[in-house]
Amino acid sequence: MRLKLINSKRALIIYLEGEIDHHSVIALRENMDKEIKRTTARTFILDLSGITFMDSSGIGMIMGRYKLISMMNGSVIISCASDRIGKLLRMSGVDKLVKMCETEDAALNMAEEG
Amino acid sequence: MRLKLINSKRALIIYLEGEIDHHSVIALRENMDKEIKRTTARTFILDLSGITFMDSSGIGMIMGRYKLISMMNGSVIISCASDRIGKLLRMSGVDKLVKMCETEDAALNMAEEG
Amino acid sequence: MDNYIKVEIMSRSDNERLSRSIAAAFALSSDPTLEEINEIKTAVSEAVTNAIIHGYEDSEGIVCMECASCANVITIKISDTGKGIENIDQAMEPLYTGKPDSERTGLGFTIMQTFMDSVEVQSKKGEGTTVTMTKKIGTN
Amino acid sequence: MDNYIKVEIMSRSDNERLSRSIAAAFALSSDPTLEEINEIKTAVSEAVTNAIIHGYEDSEGIVCMECASCANVITIKISDTGKGIENIDQAMEPLYTGKPDSERTGLGFTIMQTFMDSVEVQSKKGEGTTVTMTKKIGTN
Ligand SMILES: Nc1ncnc2c1ncn2[C@@H]1O[C@H](COP(=O)(O)OP(=O)(O)O)[C@@H](O)[C@H]1O
Ligand SMILES: Nc1ncnc2c1ncn2[C@@H]1O[C@H](COP(=O)(O)OP(=O)(O)O)[C@@H](O)[C@H]1O
């Protein structure tokens, strides 16, 4: 996980990396929640371009973060999901809750508008 | 396996590729012997730069080709062996029978001299 | 039958990755596309994760994975001797999860069914669960 | 014991590659260097090839591979129920091969000993052979 805070837009880009499954999600969830709770950002962009594998545990993790961030009145944008991950996100209905963008720039433009 | 015939030097460069074990060696041996028997080349340069794995079946295969080529009065040069494959070749004494070069150019220079 | 392996794996969450790597390595000799490999990996990951967290409820146990290939069909059977499933039809319903308090989505079986050609579940309460999946390689 | 898997593999020559991929995938969680992974793969390839061509003499059989990790030591046990070795000391001598007419080098055991920290061979004529190898990860 790498982070980039875009102060001008109060947006935090969270770059997720590697394989996301029930095992790796445990540490990832903890790290993300810590950052989500202490940042000044209001828009959270989850950049999935570095994800090489993801199963339903990843979907659960994204939904969980969506709930936490919504509770804090923040919003979530998913960017750079591969075709396969896009399919999983649609299957689970995450795409109905969360905005999805193909590029980081598009996500940042949305952050500005929102 | 890819081949390059350098007519001016009567040298045939044989580029070996992928994983060499007891399984893959079966087809490889057959292909190599066919080419060795029909070519006009006298010097055979085995380029190992494309080998990603090799065990003692590969050593046996190289020794077998050395014997065949020697019987036909040809000579063998090994080029571009990785550190690990170099170790295997020294363990087996192949380096005593066959000239070893670090680059293709060095191998071709040797072919000219020989 | 063309080829067959049987693997017994400890029910540790870091072995989810190992299991799907093994299934992918087995499938390789059927010359699948990258997409097909990824679909197999995802389905295996779902079934093995279920065995670990639902079957054994994170306690120690052995997950067994058998892979067989016959012509261009790959069959993967994943079994545990854990607590079993009482109502299989309900368990397979999309979005049903027996662990609503965790971040489970209830989509494991749905994903297996989407990515594989067939999914069959056998289970008996207290005795364990076997999931058998097949996939034809080279159709898309 | 940290982790353990047991794999049963058909004695087909194309499963030599599968076995070493599985051993490599198992070893990954001990955080080895690329060099260490390659040494393990080579040793496993030698032992599995021996089981297939010497143990079963290319007939059908099951090769069993067990991998265990304990702290930073990986133990790999490869066994067959094939024809066995009459004289183990002789078999382990560098350059000794029971198949001088093929292109075998007689270096299999020597390579296992060079690339692993210990190699132990148990065998009984007519009953089969078990090769147990260990390697400490993170020493070079
Ligand atoms: N191997 C298993 N052993 C026991 N129960 C299982 C097993 N696999 C699945 N189940 C049950 O079926 C339910 C649905 O599974 P699934 O669709 O994979 O969703 P999830 O894992 O997100 O709960 C699980 O919540 C669990 O109650
Ligand atoms: N699993 C086995 N079953 C029966 N014989 C074996 C086995 N492994 C090794 N041997 C015997 O030991 C000899 C030496 O083995 P090795 O050093 O690997 O060389 P190579 O495989 O090149 O012959 C073999 O030729 C064979 O006679």
Image (spheres, coloured by chain):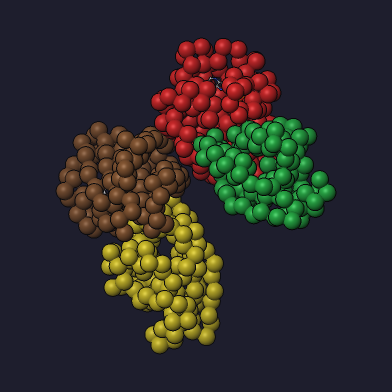
Chain colours: A yellow, B green, C brown, D red
Rendered location of residue B84, percent (x, y): 69, 42
Residue at left 18%, top 45%? Answer: C88
Q: Reply above or below: A100 against C41.
A: below
Rendered location of residue A91, percent (x, y): 28, 64
Rendered location of residue C97, percent (x, y): 25, 53
Q: Quadrant of residue A81?
A: bottom left
**Side of C118 relative to B92 (left or right):** left
Q: Reply above or below: C116 against D75.
A: below
Residue at left 77%, top 42%? Answer: B99
Q: Residue furthest bottom?
A: A113
Q: Quadrant of residue C52?
A: top left
**Ligand 2, what quadrant?**
top right
For the image, the number of numbered tags is: 0
Q: Is residue B67 visible?
A: yes
Residue at left 50%, top 68%? Answer: A15
**Side of D75 relative to B45 (left or right):** left
- Of the 4 image quadrants, the one containing the C terminus of chain D is top right
Q: Nearer the viewer, residue D17 or C56?
A: D17
**Side of B37 relative to D49 (left or right):** right
Q: Nearer the viewer, residue D119 or D94?
A: D94
Residue at left 69%, top 23%? Answer: D94
Q: Reply above or below: B35 against D122.
A: below
Rendered location of residue A69, percent (x, y): 39, 71
Q: Is residue C100 visible?
A: no
Q: Nearer the viewer, residue A19 or B100?
A: B100
Q: Quadrant of residue B56?
A: top right
